[in-house]
Image (cartoon, helix red, strand yellow):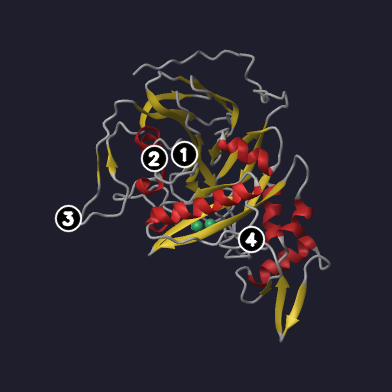
Amino acid sequence: MKVHLLPFVAALWITATWPLSLSGAELSWWKGNLHTHTMWSDGDDYPEQIAKWYKDHGYHFLALSDHNTLQVGERWIDVMKSKGGPPALQKYLAAWGKDWVQQRDQGGRQQVRLRTLEEFRKRVEEPNRFLMIQSEEVTDRWKTAPVHMNATNLRHKITPQGGDSVFDVMQRNMNALLAQRKATEQPMFLHLNHPNFGWGVTAEELMRVKGERFFEVYNGHPSVRDLGDATHASTERMWDIINTRRLTELKLGLLYGLATDDAHNYHGMAANRSNTGRGWVMVRAAKLDAASLVLAMEKGDFYSSTGVTLKSLKQSSKEIDLTIQAAEGVQYTTQFIGTRRGYDATHKPITLANGTKLRVTHRYSAEVGQVLATVKGPRARYMLQGDEIYVRAKIVSSKPQKNGTTPNARESAWLQPVTP
Ligand SMILES: [Zn+2]
Ligand SMILES: [Zn+2]
């Protein structure tokens, strides 16, 4: 294994603004969450309360992705039957006032009208500070397998398209998004959510979806099983399997990995509740607008995080060079992970004793997604050798993730893969 590590030098490029875009406009890092629920579906708080939480906690953008609905039209909820109940209403009234909160009495039932995105975005958006992005969690299934896909920056609601296999469901929803993008010329994307939720989606199914560019390598909901189990591959293992085969036999291009909250519960933090602040993306773009963010993400110019922040990042077909914003007393380990050409490509389905094949991700050799180099400390660099199919960096810190859903979760970051 050949590893090129440079000694630390106080080089010029270590500045927060590197690099400059072609137009000369300075690029900035924008922090955002692309997966969150409100009372428009099964979240337990009002949308503007949730937007306010993200804005107050240093995020720059937020996509509220309710199940099979946009936040449009007239919708009244019954306070007693609503997920947040009277306590959520009290907090909502305290924060936004009686003039903003619309209430009515319907045959003795207290009701509140949910504000639409067009209405409440005016109250939270600020140029170059905070942006709302329209979104929907297209919530579909095949038989009992959940197939959930988030449409970021869509213009019109997408009805779940159904299909005759998990792959078909994903492809048909993907095609619906691509058709809308073509018709509207608005940059938008559809990402596959939490593949291990309900053991819904395998690597072999996801890798074949044409036009798919993103999936959730980290989802902060406590029931999504990102780490897999003895029978099911982790989302990170799936990511390596998918990119290895997409870039060789399938020729379908890189799949990027997102970290999201998938928050539903906004009243009380606990490991077993789906809370805010667990996973996010940092996107490098000249401007804080939806089109710039989508296009930057499609170029892979972003990373996913559960706590680790970068001071600088340079990624190309030749090298990955990163510096971490190191916190006092915290150790950082960066692994460069990839698959080399000529890897052992055998893979086997998992079968029961009676010979039945399970619909789970196959087993692959250790040469798929192997650790190519490990670097300790705040700066890490990897020079590509040229025989890698792709390389990605993952940083794990010694600091426990705040309010993590698994006992040993450490603050981490996942960089996007590059190819030589
Ligand atoms: Zn979901
Ligand atoms: Zn969700």
- Would you say the residues marked 1 and 4 are in contact, meaning their CB atoms lie under 8 Å apart? no
- Tell me which label, 1 or 4, sits earlier in the chain: 4
Q: CA distance from mark 1 to mark 4?
A: 26 Å
Q: Secondary structure at mark 2?
A: helix
- Would you say the residues marked 2 and 4 are in contact, meaning their CB atoms lie under 8 Å apart? no
- Tell me which label, 2 or 3, sits earlier in the chain: 2
Q: Crowding near pointer 2: few (<14 within 10 Å), some, many (20+)?
A: many
Q: Is residue 33 above or below residue 396?
A: below
Q: CA distance from mark 2 to mark 4?
A: 31 Å
Is residue 221 visible in the rendered structure shown here? no
The three-letter code of the residue at mark 3 reads: Gly
Q: Quadrant of residue 32?
A: top right
Q: Residue at x 78, y 42 (%)?
A: 127
User: What is the x, y in percent for residue 363?
Assistant: 27, 43
- Would you say the residues marked 1 and 3 are in contact, meaning their CB atoms lie under 8 Å apart? no
The residue beneath circle 1 is: 255
- Would you say the residues marked 1 and 2 are in contact, meaning their CB atoms lie under 8 Å apart? yes
The three-letter code of the residue at mark 4 reads: Leu
The residue beneath circle 3 is: 355
The residue beneath circle 4 is: 70
- Tell me which label, 2 or 4, sits earlier in the chain: 4
Does any atom of ligand 1 lie closer than 8 Å to the CB of label 1?
no
Q: CA distance from mark 2 to mark 3?
A: 25 Å
Q: CA distance from mark 1 to mark 3?
A: 32 Å
User: What is the x, y in percent for residue 340?
Assistant: 34, 26
Does any atom of ligand 1 lie closer than 8 Å to the CB of label 2?
no
Quick check: 324 left or right of 336?
right
Q: Secondary structure at mark 3?
A: loop
Quick check: 372 left or right of 185?
left
